[in-house]
Image (cartoon, rainbow, N blue to C red):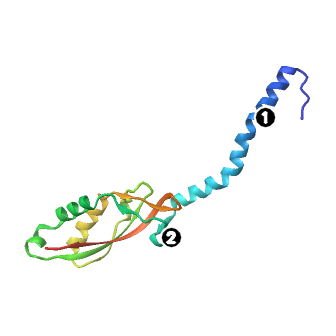
C-alpha cells in the first residue's frame, strides 16, 4: 500500500475505501444469486414444480374470446369439439408468441381458432417461492354448439 503523506489525501483515500466496502460486499454476496436469478429467468417450469400455477386474469374475457372465435360454419352446423393447446406464460403473465402449439384438436379449424384466442389471453404468472417465472401450460378449450 502506498504511503500518503498529505493528511487531506490520506483522509479522502480512507473515505473512498470505506465507501467501496458495501459495494464490494454486495457484488460478492449478491453476484452468485443474481446469476441464478438470471438463469432462472430463461428456464421454463412445468406447473408441477411451482408453488402457485398461472391463472387466467379474467375467465369472463376468456369465455368471450372463445365464443367469438368459434368458426361460424362449424357453429351453424352444430359441430363442436375440443382443442388442447400447449404454450409458455412468461413472468409477466403474457403468452409467448411463438410458443403456442395445438397438441390435439377434434377439428383443424377449431385448433386454429383456439391458437388465436390463447395469444390474446392474460394470466397471473406462475410463481416459484414468490418469484414470477416462465411456465409451460396445457390448456383444453371446448367449443360447444
Q: Nearer the viewer, residue 29 or 3?
A: 29
Alpha-carbon distance for marks 2 and 1? 44 Å
**Label for residue 114?**
none
The residue that mark 1 highlights is 17
**First in sequence: mark 2 or mark 1?**
1
Percent position of residue 138, x then y: 37, 71
The residue that mark 2 highlights is 49
**Number of numbered markers:** 2
Q: Residues within 10 Å of mark 1 (few under 14, many from 20)?
A: few
| Residue ID at (43%, 66%) | 53
| Residue ID at (49%, 67%) | 50
Q: Quadrant of residue 86?
A: bottom left
Up-down: is 25 above or below 133? above
Q: Nearer the viewer, residue 72 or 121?
A: 121
Which one is closest to the eye, mark 2 or mark 1?
2
Percent position of residue 41, x then y: 52, 58
| Residue ID at (22%, 63%) | 63
95 horizontally vs 116: left or right: right
Q: Give SS at disc 2.
A: helix
106 horizontally vs 126: left or right: left
Up-down: is 90 above or below 5? below
Up-down: is 78 above or below 17? below
Q: Give SS at disc 1.
A: helix
Percent position of residue 49, x then y: 50, 70
Amino acid at each position: 500500500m502506498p504511503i500518503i503523506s498529505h493528511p487531506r489525501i490520506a483522509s479522502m483515500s480512507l473515505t473512498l475505501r470505506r465507501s467501496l466496502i458495501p459495494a464490494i460486499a454486495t457484488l460478492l454476496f449478491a453476484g452468485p444469486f443474481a446469476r441464478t436469478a438470471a438463469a432462472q429467468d430463461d428456464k421454463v417450469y412445468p406447473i408441477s414444480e411451482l408453488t402457485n400455477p398461472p391463472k387466467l386474469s379474467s375467465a369472463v374475457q376468456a369465455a368471450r374470446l372463445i365464443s367469438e372465435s368459434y368458426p361460424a360454419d362449424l357453429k351453424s352446423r352444430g359441430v363442436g369439439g375440443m382443442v388442447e393447446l400447449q404454450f409458455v406464460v412468461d413472468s409477466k403473465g403474457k403468452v409467448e408468441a411463438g410458443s403456442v402449439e395445438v397438441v390435439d384438436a377434434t377439428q383443424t379449424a377449431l385448433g386454429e381458432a383456439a391458437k388465436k384466442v390463447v395469444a390474446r389471453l392474460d394470466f397471473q404468472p406462475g410463481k416459484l417461492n414468490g418469484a414470477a417465472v416462465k411456465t409451460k401450460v396445457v390448456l383444453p378449450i371446448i367449443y360447444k354448439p
